[in-house]
Every structure is written in C-alpha cells, then in structure tokens.
C-alpha cells in the first residue's frame, strides 16, 4: 500500500465519525506534504479540521515515513467539485462556466443529474424600441459544467 493510499484510507475512516463532513481534495506531494481539503453540509468548523488531523496523525508512523500534514476547509472561492456541494449551495449565486458561456445566476435546484440556474437578463423588446427585463432559467447537466464557483455578495 502506498503512502497516499494509506492516508486516504485513514482519512475516510476518520470522516466516518463526522457524516456531515466530506473529502474534496487529497494531495500528497513528492516531499510527503499531505494537503487535505474538506467541506461540510453545514460548513466545516476549526474543530472538525483538528479532529481529522489528529486522527490521521495518531495512525501514521513518522518513523516509517516523515510527512507534513495540512487539513483545512476549502475556501469560498474554490470551484465546486461534488454534487453534494451543489446541493448544499441551493439558493446561492454561482458563476458557472460552460464550454460556450459564463453565467452568474442563482442556483435554484440541484439533483443527481443537473442544476437549474435562474437570473434576470436585459433583452430587446419584442415590439418597439428599448429593452425589457426577462427571467431566464437554464438546466445544465453536470457534465457540461467546466467550473462553478459560489460568489459572495455583501
């Protein structure tokens, strides 16, 4: 079993105790720096990161392999990677990049196959001059999304 496989196994076992927390990213560099990115259905508390770090640390032997360990929650500007992340962000504004366009819109629904986005757009009137505001709604399969990031508005 490689070092990364061992860390991954320990990480998944440690997360079993915290079902609302889930793994987003695990990187093990050539210098054996372990970087763990976590997210949670209700966010990730500092204590969650500490608990996961201690669980991994307690079950690895530094005599066998010296390593550095970093456990953190993914940042607000990090791209969404899992369907579970889309579901937890329903009601928030996303910037979604597809092969053909970039859309800033509210995520109104997320299921196992696609997301539905909703936004207002200014379009030319059908009759007469000027523009009117229209409500747009678009269903996008996950496979068509190149990147999606939650935007923070104040």
Image (tube, grey):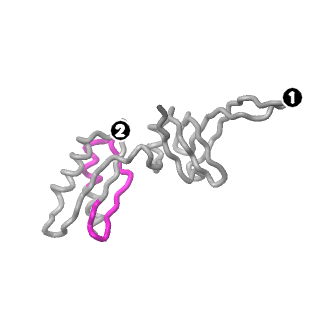
- The residue pinned by badge 1 equals 128
Question: Which image quadrant: the N terminus?
Answer: bottom left
Q: Quadrant of residue 134?
A: top right
- The 10 Å Cα crowd at callout 2, few under 14, some 14 to 19, many 20 or more, is some
- Who comes first in sequence, dot 1 or dot 2? 2
Under circle 1, the secondary element is loop
For the point 42% across and 43% down, which residue is it? 76
For the point 15% across and 55% down, which residue is it? 58
User: Between 55 and 27, which is closer to the camera in this rendering?
Assistant: 27
Residue 141 rendering spot, x and y as whole percentages? 59, 47
Question: Looking at the picture, does residue 10 appear above or below residue 83?
Answer: below
For the point 77% across and 31% down, which residue is it? 131
Residue furthest out toward the right: 128
- The residue pinned by badge 2 equals 43
- Residue 115 appears left or right of 7: right
User: Between 24 and 74, which is closer to the camera in this rendering?
Assistant: 74
- Residue 60 appears left or right of 32: left
Taking the magenta stretch, the answer to whether it contains residue 21 is yes
Under circle 2, the secondary element is loop
Residue 111 rendering spot, x and y as whole percentages? 53, 40
Q: CA distance from mark 1 to mark 2?
A: 49 Å
Residue 137 rendering spot, x and y as whole percentages? 65, 36
- Residue 136 appears left or right of 63: right
The region drawn magenta spans 11-34
Residue 47 rendering spot, x and y as whole percentages? 23, 41
Question: Is the Cβ of the residue at disc 1 closer than 8 Å to that at disc 2?
Answer: no
């Amino acid at each position: 079993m490689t070092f990364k496989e061992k860390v991954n196994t320990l990480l998944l076992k440690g997360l079993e105790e915290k079902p609302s927390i889930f793994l987003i990213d695990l990187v093990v560099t050539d210098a054996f720096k372990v970087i763990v990115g976590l997210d949670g259905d209700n966010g990730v508390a500092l204590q969650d990161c500490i608990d996961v770090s201690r669980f991994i640390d307690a079950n690895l032997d530094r005599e066998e392999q010296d390593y550095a360990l970093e456990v953190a929650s993914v940042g607000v500007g990090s791209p969404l990677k899992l369907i579970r992340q889309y579901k937890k962000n329903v009601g928030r504004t996303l910037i979604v990049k597809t092969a053909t366009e970039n859309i800033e819109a509210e995520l109104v629904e997320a299921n196992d196959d696609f997301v539905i986005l909703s936004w207002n757009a200014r379009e030319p009137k059908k009759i007469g001059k000027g523009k009117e505001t229209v409500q747009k709604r678009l269903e996008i399969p996950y496979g068509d999304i190149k990147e999606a990031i939650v935007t923070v508005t104040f």
